[in-house]
Amino acid sequence: MQRLLAAVLAAMLLLGCSEKKGRNGPIKVGVLHSLTGTMEVSGKSVRDATVLAIDELNEKGGVLGRRIEAVVVDGKSDDAVFVQEAERLITREQVSVVFGCWRSSGRKSVLPIFERHKHLLVYPVQFEALEETPNIVYLGATPNQQIIPAVKWCMDNLGKRFFLVGSDYVFPRTANAIIRDMVTALKGEIAGEEYVKNDGSNAKDVVAKLVAANPAVILNTVNGSATKAFFHELRLAGVTPKKVPTMSFSVAEEELRALDVTEMEGDYAAWNYFQSVDTPENRAFVARFQAKHGKDRVIGDPMEAAYFGVHLWAQAVIDAETDEPGAVLRQFPGQSMKAPEGIVAIDPFNLETWKTVRVGRIRKDGQFDVVWSSSKAARPVTYPALRTKQQWLDFLDALQKGWGGRWANPNG
């Protein structure tokens, strides 16, 4: 009997220690981005912005009086690795939230894991939308907050004959389907559509087809290191911003650093944030980031979204009075703040973010001059109106089946 009582007492003490640790110990969060591979440049930059926000929270005493402990993981630019690491972060590391993913193929690959575990992913990059889940908070632009207004601006200011070029996975394919619908409705013309492989090996062939098509504007959704190969071949072929301007949807300040900026001056990009945005919040944000990571560092849209996403999560944790993912998710709808880009708010119906739309022109110093912006934050729209929701879901289903159940071309 004495041994039994001793065992029960020891178990109770252990349980008490465990509960105390859970209430007062650090809050572990996952940071899941590509630190190697084709998406390395983009992934490392978003990681740095995420960690900056975590550091700021810790400097103020953490959240709920608990320090934030970041578990940083390399997705290696491989959707299968993202799946493995997302599972590990949730089940082994027992993180309260995961801040992560860049390419939509990675996000869609890990989505079932977050749904199965009823967990929380905070995703910082512009995306194709066409997705509804209670387990992901979307910080980046939906098509009506980036692609659609940028194409309309191009038609009004640059020309109506477009060549579409992208990487071969779900975001560029969907973006180009949306662009085709829009250009057709507005009586424009699609001169061609081609996809650059992740290693850039077919960039020369793609550019040859582009030159033969003689477009007025190039709409670019190439991602990762293939971007450098594409623009290199474009310039070798004599295609310059003055002759045929390019509007990019995945090239921000950080990605420009890997390119010859003198050859990019005069091209365009559409985002919700540029480092050149002149607000007190942005000036302070840039100063803090560069103080931590170096004066030569630059900041792009997904970095800024990743930064304010951490702070929105902290607000939701405080409102929930716990870091438990389900409780935090219930507090996310309606969260808002004055971010470096301006006022942002989480839509209560789709967990997407209200954002201002901006078009920027590349300067010779690698920054952007904002040449157009929306007058106010735009409401995120999950399904573009030119097709029904079911038609868009059928489109995605056909893409996935065509790629053998994947969200990217296995040969791309």
Image (cartoon, helix red, strand yellow):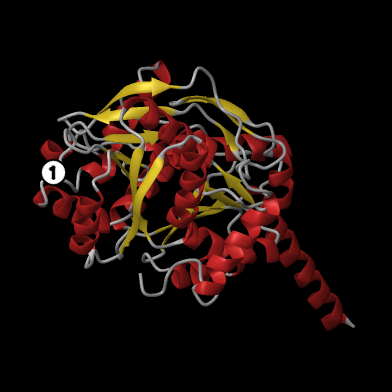
Q: In terms of depth relative to the viewer, which is nearer, 410 or 53? A: 410
Q: Is any atom of residue 126 visible in this view?
A: no
Query: Label 1 belongs to which residue?
Result: 260
- Residue at x 66% of width, y 53% of height: 135
Report x, y in % for residue 128: 52, 49
Report x, y in % for residue 49: 39, 41
Secondary structure beneath disc 1? loop
Q: In terms of depth relative to the viewer, which is nearer, 374 or 243? A: 243
Hey, which quadrant is residue 226 in on the image?
bottom left
Q: Residues within 10 Å of mark 1 (few under 14, many from 20)?
A: some
Q: Residue furthest right?
A: 1
Left or right of residue 337: residue 42: left
Q: Residue furthest front?
A: 187
Q: Quadrant of the N terminus?
A: bottom right
Left or right of residue 94: residue 153: left
Type of the residue with mark 1: Asp
Q: Is any atom of residue 110 visible in this view?
A: yes
Q: In terms of depth relative to the viewer, which is nearer, 84 or 141? A: 141
Q: Is residue 359 above or below residue 9?
A: above
Q: In terms of depth relative to the viewer, which is nearer, 197 or 113? A: 197
Report x, y in % for residue 26: 56, 50
Left or right of residue 272: residue 161: left
- Residue at x 50% of width, y 17% of height: 375
